[in-house]
Amino acid sequence: MTLRANWSYPTAIRFGAGRISEIAEACKVAGIARPLLVTDKGLAGLGITAQTLDLLDGAGLGRAMFSDVDPNPTGANVAAGVAAYRAGGHDGVVAFGGGSGLDLGKVVAFMAGQTRPVWDFADVGDWWTRADATAIHPIVAVPTTAGTGSEVGRASVLTNTLTHEKTIIFHPRILPSVVISDPELTLGLPRAITAGTGMDAFAHCLEAYCAPHFHPMSQGIA
C-alpha cells in the first residue's frame, strides 16, 4: 500500500512519494515568493537538492541556496545565513535536509527581521517574547532523513562556540508553515545515515509510546 496523505500535526504536512513536486505551490501557500533554500554542505551537491532548486526555478521562485552549515549549527552559521538572506532580498526559507539544515533554516527565517543577538532568544522562561513576532519570515520544511523531527518543532538547537554549550532557540512561530515529507528523498542517503536516523525515529516513537501524557495522534504514530 502506498500512503499519500495531508494532515496537520502540529502544522500542515504533505506526506507521500513524489510530493517534492509540490514545493513551489507550498511556498506560495506560505506566502513565499523569493525563497532561500538552506541546506548542509553534504546535500548541496546532490541530485535531490538540484531537483528541488529546478522545481523552484521553474515556478519563477529562483534557485538561491545557502549551505554553509556545520554538522552542529553555530551562531556564525546563523549570521552568515541571515546575511545571505538579506542580501538576496528573500522573503522566506525552504529548510531542506536533516537536523542541521532544518534547524539553521528555521533560525535564519526567525532572525532575518530581529535586531537582538540570537542567544537572547534561548528557551529560558519567557525570553521568546523578546522577539518581534511580526518580523519572523515564513518557512517550508523538507526533511530528507527519518529521525530529527525538527520539521514539526518550534525550536532549533545551536552550538555556542564561546561557551561550548548547545542552546535551544525557541519561538512558537519558528514552526514551519508547510512540511513536505517525501520518503523518496531518503533513498539516496548513505547506509550509515539511513541506519542512524532510522534508530532516531524509532527512539522518538518509543518515547511517545512510553510517555505518561497521552495524545491520540502521538499514540497512533508510535
Image (cartoon, rainbow, N blue to C red):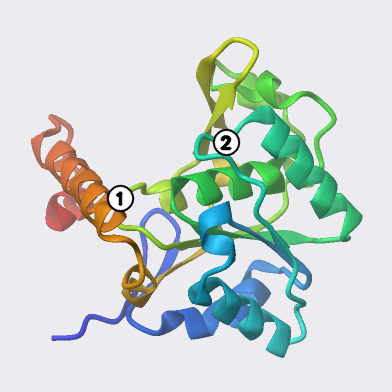
> What is the secondary structure assignment of the residue under circle 1?
loop
Comparing 141 with 164, the one in front is 164
Left or right of 168, for residue 19: left
User: In the rendered view, would you say 173 is above or below 45?
Assistant: above
**Horizontal and vertical percent position of residue 74:** 62, 31
- Figure check: 219 above or below 213: below
On the question of residue 40 being in view, the answer is: no
Q: Is residue 55 above or below residue 174?
A: below
Residue kind at label 1, given as amino acid type:
Gly
- The disc placed on residue 147 is 1
Left or right: 96 in relation to 127: left
Residue 217 image position (x, y, % from top left): 22, 54
SS state under label 2:
loop
N-terminal of the two: label 2 or label 1? 2
Pointer 2: residues within 10 angstroms few (<14), some, or many (20+)? many
Q: Looking at the image, which residue sits at the far top?
A: 163
Residue under the point 64% across and 72% down = 27
